[in-house]
Image (spheres, rainbow, N blue to C red):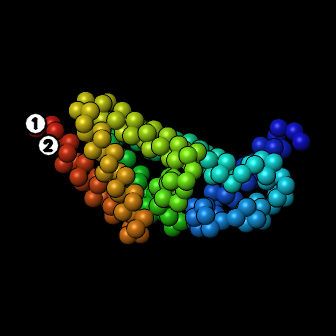
């Protein structure tokens, strides 16, 4: 099979896996369900992803790229460096309000498999480290102390977990307000 057909089949498998894993959880979704949802044969699915764990890794890798790209596109629309920090929470609030929002895919994946799957735990750590680095960069570009980056990152992470549990976008607003207070207090110090 040629590379284009393989890539297309892999995308179909990943589309199905992402939809099912994110909606239902990783452990509750079997390869048969992914086969049915993707329209691929089970043999083809296992040729592409020899183990479910590899499919989970690929799902998290692909989602990470899209998630971080979409966040950066939203944030970079703003000129003011401090406004860019707050724009992170605007974007999170929009994400939390989506009808299919089911929490953070990486927190969910870690909760399900982090203790038993090093490849999944590694993907989660990579995603969280990249997000933390992005937030730290926003803070640095606003000429604020490095320590504020960690605080803003933790506010965003807390908002993600709380929004999933409460099924409300309001944690993004509350975290944004706390961030604004931190920025103001830092500027006055």
The percent position of residue 173, horizontal first and vertical second, equals: 30, 58
- Residue at x 30%, y 30% (from the top left corner): 140
Most extreme residue toward the left, as rendered?
A: 189
Checking the image for residue 185, the label placed there is 2
- Residue 27: image quadrant is bottom right
- Residue at image mark 1: 189
Q: Residues within 10 Å of mark 2 (few under 14, many from 20)?
A: few
Does the rendering let one see residue 17? yes
- Residue at (58% x, 45% y) in the render: 119
Task: Identify whether 4 is placed above or below 43.
Answer: above
Q: Are marks 2 and 1 in contact (CB under 8 Å)?
A: yes
Report helix, strand or loop for mark 1.
loop
Q: Which residue is pictured at 46% across the width and 55% down the height? A: 107
Position of 66 compared to 15: left or right? left
Instruction: In this rendered view, identify the residue nearer to me: 19 or 107.
Output: 107
The reply, left or right, for residue 36 in relation to residue 61 is: right
Quote the CA–CA distance across marks 2 and 1. 6 Å
Residue 110's x, y, as percent? 50, 54
């Amino acid at each position: 099979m040629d590379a284009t057909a393989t890539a297309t089949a892999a995308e179909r498998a990943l589309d199905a896996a992402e939809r099912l894993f994110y909606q239902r959880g990783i452990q509750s979704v079997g390869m048969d369900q992914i086969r049915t949802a993707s329209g691929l044969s089970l043999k083809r699915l296992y040729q592409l992803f020899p183990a479910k764990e590899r499919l989970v890794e690929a799902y998290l890798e692909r989602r990470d790229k899209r998630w971080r790209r979409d966040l950066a596109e939203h944030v970079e629309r703003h000129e003011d460096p401090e406004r860019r920090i707050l724009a992170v929470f605007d974007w999170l609030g929009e994400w939390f309000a989506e009808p299919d929002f089911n929490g953070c895919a990486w927190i969910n994946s870690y909760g399900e498999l982090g203790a038993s799957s090093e490849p999944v735990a590694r993907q989660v750590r990579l995603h969280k480290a990249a997000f933390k680095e992005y937030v730290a960069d926003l803070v640095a570009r606003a000429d604020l102390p490095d320590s504020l980056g960690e605080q803003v990152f933790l506010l965003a992470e807390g908002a993600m977990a709380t929004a999933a549990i409460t099924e409300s976008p309001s944690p993004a607003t509350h975290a944004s307000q706390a961030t604004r207070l931190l920025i103001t207090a830092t500027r006055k110090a």
